[in-house]
């Protein structure tokens, strides 16, 4: 970072801090509720791409109306922040702790009017969720949830590591190439059902032994040859040996 | 009493039959034992399978599927998997055994090819074996479709498209085989009839003929120290029979172990087939991956020859398999023409003794291997971090280069090995005629 920019950055942060000192967060009811720690983190780690007020720059999309759901999805799955706008946006270990993520999410939410972090009750109908999952999700994420590479460099990630909240957020937000599932497509009950099914996929619909890499026919082929046929050949050699 | 004595004499005589001992001669027996296990498990599965496409609502032991609309076929497979004691185990053993069965046939055929065992007088038996391979692959395809789940339904849909692509006759073939336009409620019933009656009867008939001819023509063997017209090995009774029994028992143990420990085709996760839904990564069982690979990477060639239309699946779905198996069937006859050797051969050759044949075989196998890998190009692309379209182009290049390159390498290796260690000269035709 050039010296001048660094200086400007410090000035901005200092100004922000000073501003907050004058206006404590929990001040008045009806206030958007800007969180000082959130704003501080935002200015430090996000503003250089998304703009100081979330208005977006050529390096990053506007965050004014993405809402808390989007912020929480990208931060809690470690997809954000990235060091370079050209970095691949994929699941990583989160860069922040829970409190920091909460503060950032609250701040991004205060930038405009986006959907809040969904409150997912764990009473979804698993069977209905399975049908919806196979209809809407399995064509990219796979019926076993393992995900694959799609065309044009797009990858559908595995859903096997997502929390219920993250699944619900992904449906609202439509990260990357994923479509947004509006309430007209998936209503409240249906969203809860899909979330419940993904949770069930993670916590064990496996029967009949080790599921291997869950890549279906590819695994089965490797096991059929690497275990099945190979062991048969060894058996044949052993049995045919003359004494 | 006369009958008993006569039977005893016949068994005694048969028991004295000598079988050569080389381990590679057990490869066909691996396929045979797999076939027995397929019959045994398949019969039990058939008790519980309901070959009906009629719709129903599920209320069985598997809760995540409660109230879901599905075919009776799929419902019966769920019932088999979750309500019938050891049902899932039997289903998994049956499926693993099917994969190993076709694998064993292929390995057996590779041995036959590279040692020249198909030469006179065994050309007919070679063709019977090849037919067994094609018929077994077809039955695998039908069997996989029977659960009527989302993954196999996608495969059946591809099979339907391939059948439709046959010029002029396509619609007729597809209609008869699939019971009307896809998806048809008739399909699983027809597939089931072919899978459990028609093809198994054909397999039993062809296999019996295969064995009868081996018996009558005696087994081939590698050159031995003894006279060329003498089969060296173990007697059928008791030695060889004990080996077969040992193979049967140990293979059953391994296959039941695989069925118990390794999950295969979790149809309850794939869900019931629905025309609007799809799942990834999708593909057929390994023995049809070369067709799937062709469909994925070969250029789409849609021809219109006057009134006759040839849709693009025809090349990868029909032409490529027909070329593969046609070439294999024609090979013994082509080789006779090329070498001028029309003699009878009971002694096997080593791959190095015939560099040309070896090179041809290696080229053919690598062609099939590349197509097989290409059937997984989306999954491999994901693993390598390479775009699917790039993978397609790369596979096209490899498909052209690899067979030629590996064929040349095989030819040179075989020639160098043969120079270092020439074939024994007891391969003479005259000697072998004595047998």
Image (tube, rainbow, N blue to C red):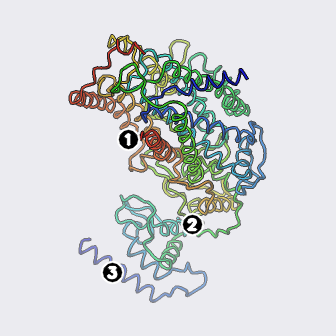
- Residues B385 and A64: in front is B385
Numbered marks: total: 3
Assign a secondary structure to mark 2: loop
Q: Residue at x 65, y 43 (%)?
A: B149
Assign a secondary structure to mark 1: helix
- Which of the image's four quarters has the C terminus of chain B? top left
Q: Rounded to the nearest whole Å, what is the CA distance between mark 1 and mark 3?
A: 48 Å
Please rate how many residues cluster around mark 3, counting C-alpha atoms within 10 Å: few if below 14, some from 14 to 19, many from 20.
few
Residue where numbered disc 3 is placed:
A11
Q: Position of residue B136 (x, y in %)?
A: 57, 30
Please rate how many residues cluster around mark 1, counting C-alpha atoms within 10 Å: few if below 14, some from 14 to 19, many from 20.
some
**Residues under numbered marks 1 and 3 in contact, where contact means CB atoms less than 8 Å apart:** no
Q: Position of residue B222 (x, y in %)?
A: 37, 27
- Which of the image's four quarters has the N terminus of chain B? top right
Q: Quadrant of residue B180?
A: top right
Asked if B100 appears above or below A73 in the picture, the reply is above
Assign a secondary structure to mark 3: helix
- Residues B416 and A211: in front is B416
Residue where numbered disc 2 is placed:
A163
**Residues under numbered marks 2 and 3 in contact, where contact means CB atoms less than 8 Å apart:** no
- Residues B164 and B266: in front is B266
Q: Position of residue B402 (x, y in %)?
A: 33, 33
Q: Earlier in the sequence, mark 2 or mark 3?
A: 3
- Residues indicated by labels 1 and 3 sit on the same polypeptide chain: no
**What chain letter is assigned to the residue under label 3?**
A
Residue where numbered disc 1 is placed:
B390
């Amino acid at each position: 970072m050039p010296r001048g920019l660094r200086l400007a950055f410090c000035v901005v942060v200092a100004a922000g801090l000073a501003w907050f000192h004058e206006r404590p967060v929990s001040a008045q009811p009806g206030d958007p509720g800007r969180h000082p720690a959130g704003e501080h983190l935002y200015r430090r780690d996000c503003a250089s791409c998304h703009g100081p007020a979330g208005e977006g720059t050529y390096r990053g999309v506007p965050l004014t109306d993405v809402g808390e759901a989007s912020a929480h999805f990208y931060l809690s799955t470690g997809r954000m922040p990235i060091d370079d706008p050209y970095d691949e946006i994929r699941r990583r270990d989160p860069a922040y702790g829970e409190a920091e993520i909460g503060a950032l999410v609250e701040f991004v939410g205060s930038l405009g009017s986006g959907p809040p972090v969904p409150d997912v009750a764990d009473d979804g109908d698993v069977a209905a969720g399975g049908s919806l999952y196979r209809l809407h999700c399995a064509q990219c994420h796979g019926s076993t949830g393992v995900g694959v590479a799609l065309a044009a460099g797009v990858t559908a990630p595995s859903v096997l590591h997502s929390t219920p909240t993250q699944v619900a957020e992904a449906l609202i937000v439509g990260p990357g190439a994923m479509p947004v599932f509006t309430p007209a497509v998936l209503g409240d009950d249906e969203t809860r059902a899909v979330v419940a099914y993904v949770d069930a996929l993670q916590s064990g619909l496996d029967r009949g032994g080790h599921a291997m890499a869950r890549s279906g026919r590819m695994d089965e082929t490797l096991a059929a040859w690497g275990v099945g046929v190979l062991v048969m050949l060894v058996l044949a050699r052993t049995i045919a040996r003359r004494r | 009493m006369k009958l008993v004595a006569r039977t005893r004499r016949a068994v005694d005589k048969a028991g004295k039959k000598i079988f050569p001992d080389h381990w590679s001669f057990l490869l066909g027996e691996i396929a045979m034992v797999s076939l027995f296990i397929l019959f045994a498990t398949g019969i039990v599965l058939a008790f519980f399978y309901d070959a009906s496409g009629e719709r129903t609502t599920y209320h069985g032991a598997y809760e995540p599927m409660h109230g879901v609309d599905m075919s009776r076929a799929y419902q019966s497979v769920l019932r088999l998997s979750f309500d019938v004691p050891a049902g899932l185990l039997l289903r998994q053993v049956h499926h693993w055994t099917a994969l190993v069965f076709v694998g064993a046939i292929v390995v057996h055929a590779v041995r036959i090819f590279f040692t020249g065992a198909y030469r006179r007088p065994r050309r007919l038996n070679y063709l019977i074996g090849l037919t067994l391979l094609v018929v077994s692959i077809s039955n695998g395809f039908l069997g996989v479709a029977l659960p009527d789940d989302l993954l196999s339904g996608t495969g059946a849909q591809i099979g339907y498209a391939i059948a439709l692509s046959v010029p002029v006759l396509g619609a007729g073939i597809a209609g008869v085989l699939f019971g009307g336009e896809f998806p048809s409620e008739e399909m699983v019933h027809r597939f089931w009839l072919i899978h459990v009656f028609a093809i198994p009867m054909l397999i039993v008939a062809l296999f019996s003929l295969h064995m009868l001819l081996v018996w009558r023509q005696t087994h081939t063997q590698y050159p031995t120290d003894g006279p060329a017209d003498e089969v060296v090995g173990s007697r059928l009774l008791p030695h060889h029979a004990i080996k077969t029994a040992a193979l049967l028992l140990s293979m059953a143990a391994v296959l039941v172990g695989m069925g118990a420990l390794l999950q295969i085709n979790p149809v309850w996760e794939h869900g019931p087939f629905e025309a609007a839904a799809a799942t990834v990564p999708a593909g057929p069982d390994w023995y049809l991956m070369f067709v799937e690979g062709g469909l994925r990477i070969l250029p789409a060639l849609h021809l219109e020859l006057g009134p006759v239309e040839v849709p693009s699946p025809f090349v990868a779905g029909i032409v490529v398999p027909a070329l593969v198996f046609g070439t294999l069937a024609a090979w013994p006859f082509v080789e006779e023409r090329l070498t001028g050797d029309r003699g009878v051969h009971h002694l096997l050759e080593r791959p190095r003794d015939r560099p040309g044949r070896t090179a041809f075989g290696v080229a053919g196998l690598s062609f099939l291997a590349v197509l097989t890998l290409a059937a997984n190009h989306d999954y491999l692309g994901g693993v390598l971090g390479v775009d699917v379209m790039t993978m397609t182009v790369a596979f096209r290049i490899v498909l052209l280069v690899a067979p030629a390159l590996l064929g040349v390498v095989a030819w040179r290796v075989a020639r160098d090995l043969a120079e270092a260690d020439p074939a024994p000269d007891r391969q003479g035709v005259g000697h072998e005629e004595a047998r």
